[in-house]
Image (cartoon, rainbow, N blue to C red):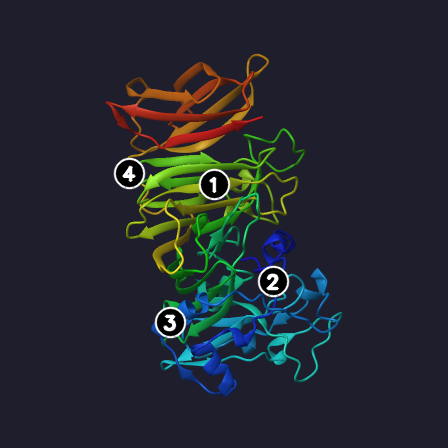
Amino acid sequence: MVESMDRRDFLSSVLALTGLAVTNPGMFDGIISAAQAQGANDAQPFSRTQLLLDARKLAQTGFVEPRLKMPEPYAEMSYDQYRSIRPKGDRALWRGEGRGFQFEFLHTGFLFKQPVQMFVIEDGKARPLGFDRDNFEYGPTIPAPEPGVDLGYSGFRVRSPINAADVWDEFAVFQGATYFRAVGKGQAYGLSARGLAIATGDPRGEEFPNFRAFWIERPGQNATACVVYALLDSPSVTGVYRFTLRPGEPTTVDVELTLFPRVELSHVGLGPLTSMFFFDATNRTRVDDYRSAVHDSEGVAMWTGRGEWIWRPLANPRTLQISGFIDQNPRGFGLVQRSRDFRDYGDLNARYDLRPTAWVEPVGDWGQGAVELIEIPTEQDIHDNIVAYWRPREPMKVGQEFSATYRLHWTNRIPNYPDQIAKVTDTRAGLGTREGFRRYMIDFNGPNLPPVDQLKLDASTSAGRLINTSLRQNSASGGVRVIFELDVRDIQLAELRVLLTANGQSVSETWLYRWTT
């Protein structure tokens, strides 16, 4: 396992955390205000129903951006200073109680300057958790705060013995805006999830909601799942979330959300995932790097409501690219790390071969909409430049609450992937046989893939033309290889599509790719 925060994580969070500030307790009603008014040691009745009422009432008021003025030297902590502040393991919540989970709270500072209210739910009552400097070890360059100085917590991480019975591994962390991450057994942190995306890729600018408070439910003895509630707030919407975390192989997080729009939300993303893609074998012409590939995720996969499986390799484009995959009642989508061999990357520090796939499995019908993919140009591997989410076709109206449920899998393998469908195991691109052409190679593999003489190749492009198209047996892998060239003269963009069929039926994923100048 790697630690929950590294330099790339800090730098890639800059955009998301710009302008965040301290929670203003006076903004809350009901559960929160009652608990805070009674003091840190007094518990008040808690229910999800009451929390929903509080969020609905909050949505009917104008958004007031909280402000924070952290005292020196904590206001301008450097990366290294912040990294030197570490939670004490022996102070973890429920340590030694045999509850299957331990929680450690994270300090404010550096990019994480927004304290988030923390509560513990025990026996149906919520008790506030006040800041305690004794929960941390402070490094030599940053002193512990004076007694009585309340710097608050910026988030929390969760531990459970998922890799060995006697080791409490960190498997999930919630910190910054509505970001959270998780890993399954044997995995290392990679991509992130978010509670909600608003206007991602919009030229007018993206809005980043915040989780302003968390309620952590005390697990039972030897529990295999834990529950966390959260209150979301932003200028456009409030909302209530219930997360049920189940660590293991894979780790799953059930997400139940209810939103109360303050304004009409015409561009909102459910189940948003954020990742990094720098280069692979399809697009390394701008990169001089010893590694074979650098990415937390290599493709977006989708299981449509019609039952079609789609695979779209990711790219690091020269200009911002936004793609939409229209569907009705999707069965699943996610950002996928398919290559699991260390030699596919060659990076001993990052271990991209251990990064998880994150798969969103909707519960119930999500109606009409599209999986939207945002690909942002980047010149370094420190930036999260990939975003994918479900965008409902219909706007969310003011005064109408919206609810959705999904299961988020942190896994090495897409759940429910059918064995009878061949999947894309490799995509490569390079110069064609003549100037102005690009050559593509796609490998399909699957245990039930028919022999090549029984297959039909369906290859097309939205612009330009395809030449030298071929389908042949791959004697090395046992699968088949598709090769074609795309004439890119006089075009700026082309949508490519490849599918294998036999006897009129699909026998492979649908491979999609966008070529751009």
The circle on residue 20 is 2
State the quadrant of the C terminus: top right
* Residue 94 visible in the snapshot: no
Residue 403 horizontal side relative to residue 343, left or right? left
**Three-letter amino acid code of the residue under disc 1:** Leu
Give the residue pinned by disc 1.
373
How many C-alpha atoms fall within 10 Å of the one at disc 4: few (<14), some, or many (≥20)?
few
Distance of mark 1 from mark 2, alpha carbons?
26 Å
Q: Which of marks 1 and 4 is nearer the N terminus?
A: 4
Q: Do the residues labelled 1 and 4 touch (CB within 8 Å)?
A: no
Percent position of residue 240, x then y: 41, 65
**Three-letter amino acid code of the residue under disc 4:** Gly
Query: Disc 3 vs disc 1: which is toward the camera?
Result: 3
Distance of mark 4 from mark 2, alpha carbons?
41 Å
Give the residue pinned by disc 4.
307
How many C-alpha atoms fall within 10 Å of the one at disc 2: few (<14), some, or many (≥20)?
many
Distance of mark 2 from mark 3, alpha carbons?
25 Å
Give the residue pinned by disc 3.
53
* Helix, strand or loop under label 3: helix
**Three-letter amino acid code of the residue under disc 3:** Leu
Distance of mark 1 from mark 4, alpha carbons?
20 Å
Q: Do the residues labelled 3 and 4 touch (CB within 8 Å)?
A: no
* Residue located 63% across and 28% down the image: 285
How many C-alpha atoms fall within 10 Å of the one at disc 1: few (<14), some, or many (≥20)?
many
- Relative depth, front residue between 333 and 157: 333
Distance of mark 3 from mark 1, alpha carbons?
34 Å
Percent position of residue 474, x then y: 41, 23
